[in-house]
């Protein structure tokens, strides 16, 4: 049998060893140790500030906690399963260092508000790091876009050739997705940055604590107004996992495009050796492992979001042990998002090369300029729906004749409709097709250059 825990004087015997292992979270919540120490130092200061303990005792607790931080950094403090969780581990070690004064640290708080505080301190730190990574990702996208404003690439709907677009315009779509991710995380941060410290187990405390004092020390914007809500709320975690999932959606969509572009069927990009692997049996292969892994890891984050929703959906107030299951999903989602953002940023920056000649050819070998023929007629007074039907018939007969629209002779155009003139060829040239789409937010070169300027401004604002 294991030895009794801090709370075990209520019990006559210790936990069964298997149940102790099952119950313990120290194997993963050690991730929170820095935040647990920081939160505990703020709590010790508050206890001294309010006279619950003496200022001398507060200093002893603060210094002892800092020693534990240094021991952990140096690898000298590595608590095991007997500690159950990171909170007991720190408190136990603190008492070993400073004696009975260490037992006063837990005055006026519970593990319930303590773990809620630790998790929020951790998550707000990670959110800021992810937001910085998003900015780096956006910066790389902008660098590539600036060099490829007039590079054309086929645009698709339903994975069918639709209309040619500026490659920069295509990439800037992902910039905008990342911008929403960056803004969304800021919004999540505002609800992460609320302090539950002082809520106690569920009902507050009889001690004359100052919750706003600790909130200020820990740079929280607010404190929870209801102690039951403070210890049981995990909305902030759900919101973060939702935001993380959306980030992964965006990375996965880009990954899918890179995988397609690198295929022999598309040949729009070449994968560089630094970001690709080979086959164990087929020597000619160069595999897009980075985007494939990002695409695959997306499901992990989705799963953690679903798991958190399921954990929360049936919990009565206030704290329940089920909430111990929130941390592994949060930790893994943070690590997954950060790793995928880093990998995709490197892939874009130095792992692929656009094949400009192939792209130039690709936009000339389809009927993606058909809409421009209809627009040409509509601009000359033909009702658009009538023009649409006319061009549909032209495409049908051209396919049957194994021709593209650019291959039709002027006489053939004029037989189709007298409104056609020699300028039809310029109107349907890929470069003009792209340049002409100059509506706000469109792929026209003027619009794309303006979008890049605006994007740079957004990045400079941090």
Image (spheres, rainbow, N blue to C red):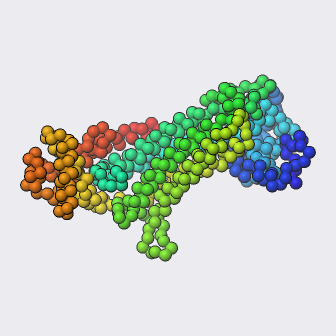
At a point 75% along the width and 28% down the height, the residue shown is 204
Tell which of 54 and 133 is nearer to you: 133
Residue 375 is left or right of residue 157, and the answer is left
In this rendering, the answer to whether 324 lies above or below 257 is: above
Spot occupied by residue 409 in the image (x, y as percentages of width and height): 11, 57
Tell which of 326 and 100 is nearer to you: 326
Spot occupied by residue 348 in the image (x, y as percentages of width and height): 43, 55
Spot occupied by residue 402 in the image (x, y as percentages of width and height): 19, 63
Tell which of 321 and 4 is nearer to you: 321
Does any portion of residue 350 appear in the rendered image? Answer: no
Residue 453 is drawn in which quadrant?
top left
At a point 73% along the width and 42% down the height, the residue shown is 321
Spot occupied by residue 280 in the image (x, y as percentages of width and height): 51, 73
At a point 92% along the width and 45% down the height, the residue shown is 12
At a point 20% along the width and 55% down the height, the residue shown is 395
Residue 283 is left or right of residue 116, and the answer is left
In this rendering, the answer to whether 46 lies above or below 265 is: above
Does any portion of residue 392 appear in the rendered image? Answer: yes
């Amino acid at each position: 049998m294991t030895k009794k825990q801090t709370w075990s004087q209520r019990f006559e015997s210790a936990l069964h060893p298997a149940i102790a292992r099952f119950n313990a979270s120290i194997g993963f919540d050690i991730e929170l140790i820095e935040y647990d120490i920081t939160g505990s130092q703020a709590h010790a200061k508050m206890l001294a500030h309010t006279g619950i303990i003496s200022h001398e005792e507060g200093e002893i607790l603060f210094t002892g906690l800092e020693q534990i931080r240094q021991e952990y950094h140096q690898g000298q403090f590595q608590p095991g399963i007997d500690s159950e969780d990171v909170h007991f581990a720190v408190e136990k070690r603190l008492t070993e260092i400073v004696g009975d004064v260490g037992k006063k640290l837990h005055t006026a708080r519970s593990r319930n508000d303590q773990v809620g505080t630790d998790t929020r301190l951790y998550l707000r730190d990670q959110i800021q790091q992810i937001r910085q990574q998003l900015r780096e990702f956006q910066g790389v996208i902008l660098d590539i876009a600036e060099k490829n404003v007039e590079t054309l690439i086929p645009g698709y709907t339903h994975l069918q050739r639709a209309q040619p677009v500026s490659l920069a315009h295509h990439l800037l779509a992902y910039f905008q997705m990342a911008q929403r991710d960056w803004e969304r995380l800021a919004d999540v941060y505002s609800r992460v940055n609320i302090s539950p410290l002082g809520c106690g187990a569920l009902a507050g405390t009889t001690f004359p604590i100052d919750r706003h004092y600790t909130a200020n020390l820990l740079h929280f914007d607010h404190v929870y107004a209801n102690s039951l809500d403070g210890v049981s709320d995990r909305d902030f975690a759900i919101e973060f996992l939702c935001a993380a999932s959306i980030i992964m959606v965006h990375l996965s969509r880009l990954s899918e495009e890179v995988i397609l572009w690198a295929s022999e069927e598309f040949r729009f990009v070449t994968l560089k050796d630094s970001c690709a692997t080979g086959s164990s049996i087929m020597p000619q292969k160069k595999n897009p492992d980075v985007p494939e892994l990002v695409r695959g890891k997306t499901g992990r984050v989705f799963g953690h979001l679903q798991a958190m929703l399921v954990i929360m959906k049936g919990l009565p107030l206030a704290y329940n042990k089920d909430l111990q299951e929130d941390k592994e999903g949060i930790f893994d989602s943070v690590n997954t998002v950060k790793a995928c953002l880093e990998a995709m940023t490197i892939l874009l920056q130095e792992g692929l090369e656009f094949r400009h000649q192939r792209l130039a050819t690709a936009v000339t070998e389809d009927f993606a300029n058909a809409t421009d023929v209809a627009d040409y007629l509509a601009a000359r007074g033909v009702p658009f729906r009538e023009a649409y039907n006319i061009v549909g018939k032209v495409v049908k007969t051209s396919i049957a004749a194994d021709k593209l629209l650019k291959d039709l002779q002027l006489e053939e155009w004029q037989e189709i409709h007298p409104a056609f003139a020699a300028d039809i060829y310029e109107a349907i040239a890929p470069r003009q097709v792209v340049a002409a789409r100059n509506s706000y937010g469109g792929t026209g070169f003027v619009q794309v250059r303006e979008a890049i300027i605006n994007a740079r401004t957004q990045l400079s604002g941090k």
